[in-house]
Image (cartoon, rainbow, N blue to C red):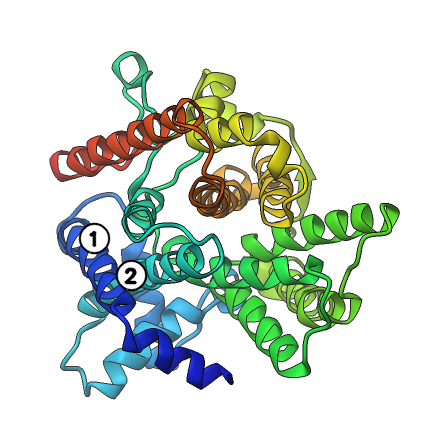
Amino acid sequence: MNFWQKIRSWLSGKEWLALIGVMALVSGVAYPIYYHRIMTPVDNDFGSHILFAQRLLMHEPMPVYTVVHPLFQVIIGGIYWLSRSAVGLWDASILVMVLALAAQAAILFVWLRKRAQAGIFISMILPVVVTFAAPLMLLAGSDGQYYYGYIGLANYHNPTVVLLRPLALASFLLGIQVFEGRTRHWGLILFSAVILIASALVKPNFALSLLPAICLLAGWYWLQRRPVDWTFLFGGFILPGVAVLFVQGLFSFFSPEAGQGSIIFAPFQVEQAFSSWLGLKFVLSLIFPLTVLIIYFKQIRNDPAMLLAWIGFCVGAFQMYFLAESNDRFFDGNFRWSAQIMLYVLFAASAYAAGRYKGTLKQRWPIWLAAAAQLAAGAVYYAHLFQVASYR
């Protein structure tokens, strides 16, 4: 049975109804908050990105830090152009945000059903948890902060980290296949390279985190004499990833328009400038993945999906807490996105583990309690952003 026959067989059942239901639910919840945060005067990054899209359409120069990853501007500008301005840039931004979240929920649903063999109800619930979960903001009553100091999950103020989600999840799922002991054909290798490059053109932080992680895991597998698809690793990840990041770094730090910025080692300096209690907020950001790790540690230590997710998250968290850009970009906190996108991937992988490893009721209730707690925190953050102009 070829690929298209499998798709037709799958669609002939009732799976597609559940898939549409998940996408509709995520879209229905996402639309009101993005409409509010984009169409009303609140603190967000959409205005600057839309301004850059306008410059792109008018063939005017954009800042070099946008030129190196312009895919969001290209997409909303393309929607505006193809619709002959019937869909404005603001409306296009809402559409892209909603579709991006629906797409990543669909990918996760299919992964849970086809690979984890999770039940239909679990496969519908977990994508919603992953999409809208947030850190447990238990310190908000004392410091008034719902975002700073934590590793953000649900994000309603930055378009590129949201658009990055489906690309990052797809690339991560391809990366797992490097360690499954089978040689992949060149079509899949090329597809993987395209997805990784596209993710970097949205925001480079996922590639900056995944490449070190997948190399570390490949080295560990090699030391253990476990199979690694080296052709897929180099052709689908290392070569295209290094190439696109090299070009982006060259333009970002060495072009005449970029100034004299560089990447520096600055442990905790950026994050401490925005918030206290970083250690506690770190733990409160990943209650669900930590619970899954503790409950299913024996299974996880031999699962390439969970190993890659945890290593990738550690790499992203290191970048957030220990690296910064020099000069006037120091407090931009652009390495914060590395931890955020990798925590999202870790949440998705933890949902996969929760759906795959059945366990006893005694094992499972802490996992569902942790998932419910972070989803409830996401609901609080969601409601909070309808009441205030700041996202912090």
Rendered-image quadrant of the C terminus: top left
Q: Give the residue pinned by disc 1.
A: 30
* Picture coordinates of residue 313, whole percent (x, y): 57, 40
Residue 38 visible here = no
Find residue 383 and report its image quarter: top left
Left or right, residue 86 beside residue 94: left
Is residue 17 rendered to the left or right of residue 168?
left
Name which residue lies at 56% across and 57% down: 172
Cα distance between the residues tagged 2 and 1: 9 Å
Q: Amino acid at mark 1?
A: Ala
Q: Residues within 10 Å of mark 2 (few under 14, many from 20)?
A: many
Q: Position of residue 157 (x, y in %)?
A: 30, 47
- Name the mark nearer the viewer: 2 or 1: 2
Q: Amino acid at mark 2?
A: Ala
Residue 102: which numbered mark, if any? 2
User: Do the residues under discs 2 and 1 have CB atoms within 8 angstroms?
Assistant: yes
The x and y percentages for residue 230 are: 79, 66
Q: Return the residue nearer the eye: 96 or 48.
A: 96
Q: Quadrant of residue 60?
A: bottom left
Q: 392 or 236: nearer the eye? A: 236
Of callouts 2 and 1, the N-terminal one: 1
Residue pictured at 82% horizontal, 50% vertical: 219
